[in-house]
Amino acid sequence: MIQFLALASSVGFIAKGIVMSEMLHELNQSTQPIRPMKVFNNWEVVPKGWYVACKSSELKTKKPLSKKICGHQIVVFRGESGSVKALDSFCPHMGMNFAKDGKVVGEDIRCHFHFWTFNGKGECTDIPSVKGTVKKSTCNRYKVQAYPVEEKYGLVWVYSDTVAPHPVFEIPELEGQEILYTHMKPFNRVAHPHITMMNSIDEQHMRTVHKLSVSLEVTNWEKGTRFFNGFSGPVLTDTLVGKIHKFFLGDRYSSSVLFEDGNLGLLTTGIDIKLFNRWTIPRGYFIFSHTFTEKGKNQVHPIVVTPKRKGLLGFLFSHAYLLFNKICMWYLAYQDGRVIYGNLRFRQDGLLAEMDGATAKWINFVNRVIEPSLWSRSKAKTEKTDLNELPTGPQAKEESPEVPLSQ
Ligand code: FES
Ligand SMILES: [Fe+2]
């Protein structure tokens, strides 16, 4: 009950914080000048990756939706077969928004203005005012950018570039298994997605913000666009929280975070933990997908996942465990969001070698590995004169220096 009241009171608090923070982010240029990095914490760069467009249930057959993802306007629509497509939102003829009274015809979408029609690959398939069959060359001249789409976890995901090199994230430990999942209400952070993600591997804040009484050891690895951070260590009993922790969950703590593509994170909790030092508890899996609608408005979509267990008891336990995890995550998110993001203008050159190593590694990883997508605005695009030419991706900014660590 107390937690519930705390959560309720936080809503107003956070709303006030958002207004304040818009100012705070732009102040103190003399003592803390803004130095944008190549990719990390850079609002102009949208990493290549899968982004949540909407809930699957929200996208009805024949009813296109216009969505702004990371500042980029796309249209998503479901053809008669049920398959979903995503295109840039504006018609290549005169620029009408497809979603505004556009009509789904079979598997294609028809623009409301002059009824030009486009398929899921972005190819023009019909121009009704042209008499007879439209020449292929004419159709080819008008193409709208199409994006890979996938439906997973009850959500429509769109990839922010032409070709998706991998499907939507799947929890490695649960690959091939049947799962159950539930969504938490998406919440907003007044901080860049990279800052919000960084928080989950910030060792020091585990002790200060979340009151975790553990001496943490950190392990990191990276593979492709994946970055892993593991936390484990003995529970300390020098505080009351530590004593309670040890009583219920044993001597050791262990959790991990796996980032993919610079915009998605998996938090795994309860790794090898035994209740009362006796019964192994199931792991908690939390996927966090990050999108932003515009600068300063990061939206986090949390998905709580658990393996599907057999029988009625298994069914009841799985759903109860999802609910339990959901409540825990709301509380952790409340602790993080209550004060921090709205009042933070991130400074990367103050990191401490001993304690902020994982954070520095993550920042350097993002700048080194994560690529800008077609949706980036890191350089203004020059006007094209060749109408056949599709917009090309932006060039990345000059190299960011390695993040230094103070000793
Ligand atoms: S603007 Fe779309 S058909 Fe003319
Ligand atoms: Fe946190």
Image (tube, rainbow, N blue to C red):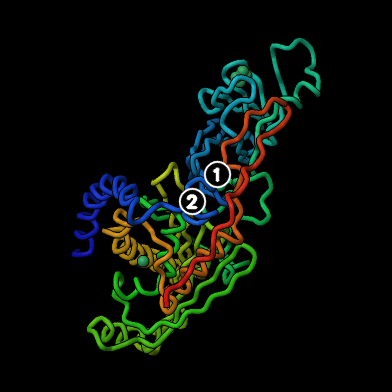
Given the image, on which type of amino acid does mark 2 rest?
A: Asn
Judge whether 38 appears above or below 363 on screen: above
- Report x, y in % for residue 328: 33, 67
Asked whether, in this view, residue 294 is left or right of residue 155, the answer is left
Q: Image quadrant for the C terminus? A: bottom left
Judge whether 324 appears above or below 29 on screen: below
Q: Quadrant of residue 313?
A: bottom left
Upstream in sequence: badge 2 or badge 1: 2
- Report x, y in % for residue 114: 62, 15
Instruction: Tell me if mark 2 has few (under 14), some (14-19) or many (20+) residues whose alpha carbon lies within 10 angstroms of its own.
Output: some
Instruction: Tell me if mark 1 has few (under 14), some (14-19) or many (20+) residues whose alpha carbon lies within 10 angstroms of its own.
Output: some
- Report x, y in % for residue 162: 67, 44
Residue that numbered label 2 is attached to: 42
Judge whether 46 appears above or below 134 on screen: below
Closer to the camera in the image, 336 or 126: 336
Query: Which numbered marker is on residue 378?
Result: 1
Q: Residue at image x 48%, y 69%?
A: 404
Is there any visible trace of residue 149 in the rendered image? no
Q: Secondary structure at mark 2?
A: loop
Rounded to the nearest angstrom, the CA distance separating label 2 from label 1 is 9 Å
- Report x, y in % for residue 108: 66, 30
Q: Quadrant of residue 364?
A: bottom right
Is there any visible trace of residue 143 in the rendered image? yes
Given the image, on which type of amino acid does mark 1 rest?
A: Ser
Whether tag 2 and tag 1 are in contact, CB under 8 A, the answer is yes
Q: Residue at image x 69%, y 11%?
A: 129
| Quadrant of the image where one finds ligand 1 | top right
